[in-house]
Image (cartoon, rainbow, N blue to C red):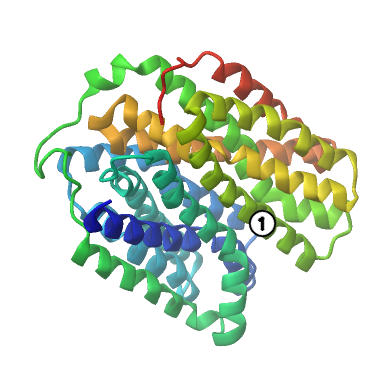
Amino acid sequence: MSSRPTIALILLSLGHFFVDLYSGSLGILQPFLVSRFSLSLTQAGLLGGLLVFSSSVTQPVYGYLSDRYRSRLFSALGPAVAGLFILGSSLAPGYGWTVALMLAGGAGISAFHPQGSAWAAAGMKRNRAHWMAVFITSGTLGFARAPAFFKEVIARIGFERLALAALPGVVVSLLLLLFVRQPAGLAAPGVKSFDWVALKAVRKPLVILFLGVFFRSAVQVTYAHFMVLFLNRERAYSLHDAAYTLTVYLTFGALGGFVGGRLADRFGAKRVIALSFAASLPFMAVFFMTPSAVGVVSLIIGGLVLYFTIPVNVVVAQRLVPSQAGTVSALLMGFAWGTSGMIFVPLTGWVADHSSMKAALAALLVFPALGYWLTRLLPEDLGA
């Protein structure tokens, strides 16, 4: 492994950590913004929805643009833009400005992911699923650390000075600008290389992979959004204990992505994707059957296994159509995740209002079963 691909992987993984750290900050910012601007819960929820839209649903647009123009600014500026604008909301003079800052910060997140995931492991000759897992796990760890990290930052320097926490993102952006170049083997800068024909040629496995991510994200995103509330309201956890339970769950999920990449290199992508869906279901079901510590441990193990597929899906899609790596990465990492969250987070809330949060969250476990059935339709020779 030469030094240049290694440096690119390290810096892009560091960028991914901070981009997702900033994207996970809104949960901590919301109580302060609600208090400052006397927001309704609908207005607070709209901020989250707009951030998901700007940071995730728009990723295919940036994937198309990065595949077409190949400018490294898409990934290099992402950490700085995300940090400065999202955390800059602590200085916003009104709700309208806060909305604008969230949309702008989300654009930085959205621009980073397609090109970052396409370039991170592109220079690696072997075990690409493993190296992709390093990149993706970095982001998942950043997202998992966001609640505790920003809680401590606000406690130490105050909400009004929170924008100072964007400085690490700015430094990482400068390092990306200085040291990361387009990997060898990709089209030269300026080549208009978007190829719809190449995408159509592998549309069946791409659709299956997309739906698999969509199904996984229905559980992943919704649980991350509602788990603290569920544990606090229906299991009588303190907010502190509920928040740290979610942090542990998300952290083990991040480790699951790393493990999944290693397993795919050894046993093949299709087997790992199928295992992830089939094995996560019973563990997560136990969590809803018992309120004891055994249930929480089972939830954490189920989350770890469910996250196996995160790097595997992306590497397989990139291998299917390497000339459109940014576009397919955006479809699987951003668009599928974002659309699933925009649909199932409010739908789960509506179901919970008419029954219970336990029933609403447990009902989502139908999706791992659907994912397992769908995975069986994938071809055997997917590679990793």
Say which of 241 and 338 sits in front: 241
Q: What's under tag 1, amino acid-wise?
A: Leu
Q: Quadrant of residue 43?
A: bottom right
Q: Quadrant of residue 207?
A: top left
Q: Position of residue 160 (x, y in %)?
A: 51, 82
The residue to which callout 1 is attached is 41
Query: Which residue is drawn at the image coordinates 59% and 25% (left, top)?
Result: 274
Q: How many marks?
A: 1
Is residue 345 in view? no
49 displayed left or right of 325: right
Compared to residue 343, the image places residue 161 above or below, namely: below
Residue farthest along the bottom direction in this orientation: 157
Q: Position of residue 208 (x, y in %)?
A: 48, 20
Residue count near mark 1 (Cα–Cα under 10 Å), binned few <14, some 14–19, many ≥20: few
The quadrant of the picture occupied by the C terminus is: top left
Query: Which residue is drawn at the image coordinates 69% and 31% (left, top)?
Result: 279
215 displayed left or right of 193: right
Q: Position of residue 243 (x, y in %)?
A: 72, 62
135 displayed left or right of 234: left
Say what secondary structure mark 1 lies in: helix
Query: Which residue is drawn at the image coordinates 24% and 22% (left, top)?
Result: 196
Q: Quadrant of residue 9?
A: bottom left
Is residue 176 in view? yes
Q: Position of residue 363 (x, y in %)?
A: 76, 31
Say which of 210 and 48 sits in front: 210
Compared to residue 183, the image places residue 98 above or below, namely: below
Compared to residue 321, the image places residue 342 above or below, namely: below
Say which of 37 and 235 sits in front: 235
